[in-house]
Image: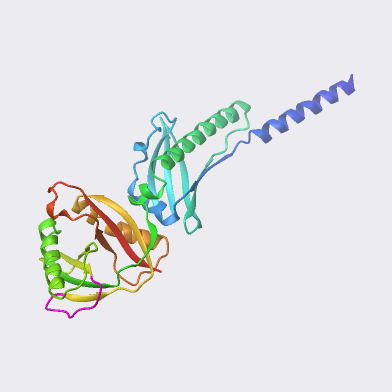
Amino acid sequence: MKRIWWVLVFFILIIVVAFYGLFPARTMIVESLKSPVNDGAVLRLLEQNKDWSTLPDTSKADWQVKLRDIEVTNYFFEFIQKKDTQFALLKVIPLSQDTSVLVWETQLPGVSLSPVAIIKNRRRARALQQTMRSFLNALEKQALDTRKVYGFEPSMGRVIDTAFLSTTLALDSLPDKAVIYKLVNKLEQYAKSQQVFTNREPILNVQEQPGNTQMKYLLMIAIPIDRVIPSKGDLMIKRMITGNLLVADVEGTLPEIFKQFPVFDAYKEDYGYVSPAIPYLKIRKDHRLLPENEPWEMQFCYPVF
C-alpha cells in the first residue's frame, strides 16, 4: 500500500513539474519577420506609417496596436484590449546590405502559481502572439518590397552619353511643360547651328534653393551631344564620366515625379552607393505634341560607384 502511495505521489510531482515547465508564470513572446529591403528602408517605412490600425487584414485582431515612441531603431508599441494594456518592443536589425529582420518581443508579467491564473496568462499570451503575427504579415503584404517602399524598383545600367549641352533657370515654382521645352528648344537650336548630333532624350534636374526666398528652384536642362562644342552665354558644356548608372522608370505628373528626387537619393544612401554627379531625369517621350494631361514617362538616373 505504501509503495502505491509513493508511486502516486511521484506521478503527481511529475505532473506538477511538467505543468509549470510547459506553462511558466512569466511568458516571453517573440515574433520576427525577414524583410527583403534593408534596415534604412524599413525604418523610413515605419516612420511614414505610424498608424498601424490602417494595415489590411488586421481589423479582427484581438488587440489594438498603437505606436507610442521611437528611439533610433527601437519602436515601442502598446497593445490594448479593453482595460488590459501590454507594452512591446520592435527592433529593426540589419542582416546584409539589402535584407533586414524585424523582431517584435514582449514579456508578460508573472502571475500567481495558481494553475487557473497560469492558464489564463497562457491564453492571453497566445492572443498577443497571434496579433503580433497578423500585423507583421500585414506589414509584409502591404509594404515590404522595394517598389512599395520607394515607389520604384531601381536597376543598374551604364552611362552612355558623356557630353551634354546644358542650361539652367531659376524659378519661383516647379517647372511645367512650357518652361521645360522652352529650354529644350533653345538647346536644340544652338546644337543645330553647331551641326552636332542630338537625337537622344533630354535630361533635367530640379533642385531646391533654401537660401533664396524668391527663386526657390533651380532647373537644369541638358541634351546629349556627339562632340564638344563651344559654350555660349548660359549654354554650357557638361561632361559625365563613364560608369554605373542607377536607373528607375517612373510615370505621373511633373510634380509627382519631382517629389521622387529625395526618395531616389534616399535609396542611394540606404544601399551605400557613392555618386560623382547629381541625379537627373531622362524624358522618355517628347511631350511637345502630346495633350497637357498626358502622363510623363521618365527615367531616374544616378551615376554611382
Residue 79 screen position, x and y as percent: 43, 38
Is 162 displayed left or right of 169 in the figure? right
Q: Residue at x 23, y 61 (%)?
A: 201
Magenta part of the protein: which range? 225-235
Q: Count numbered badges in the picture.
A: 0
Residue at left offset 37%, top offset 35%: 56
The secondary structure that most of the magenta stretch takes on is loop
Q: Residue furthest top?
A: 1
Residue 266 placement: quadrant: bottom left
Q: Quadrant of residue 233?
A: bottom left
Residue 224 percent coordinates (x, y): 24, 68
Q: Is residue 209 visible?
A: no
Q: Is residue 89 visible?
A: yes
* Residue at far bottom of view: 230
Q: Is residue 106 above or below residue 235?
A: above
- Residue under the image location 55 percent in, 29 percent down: 123
Query: In the image, 294: left or right of 42?
Result: left
Q: Is residue 232 above or below residue 1?
A: below
Closer-to-camera residue (293/264): 293
* Colour mapping used in the image: rainbow
Q: Nearer the viewer, residue 229 or 54?
A: 229
Q: Quadrant of residue 161?
A: bottom left
Viewer-side residue, 272 vs 249: 249
Residue at image point 42% right, 49% down: 75
Q: Position of residue 58 (x, y in %)?
A: 40, 33
- 252 in magenta: no
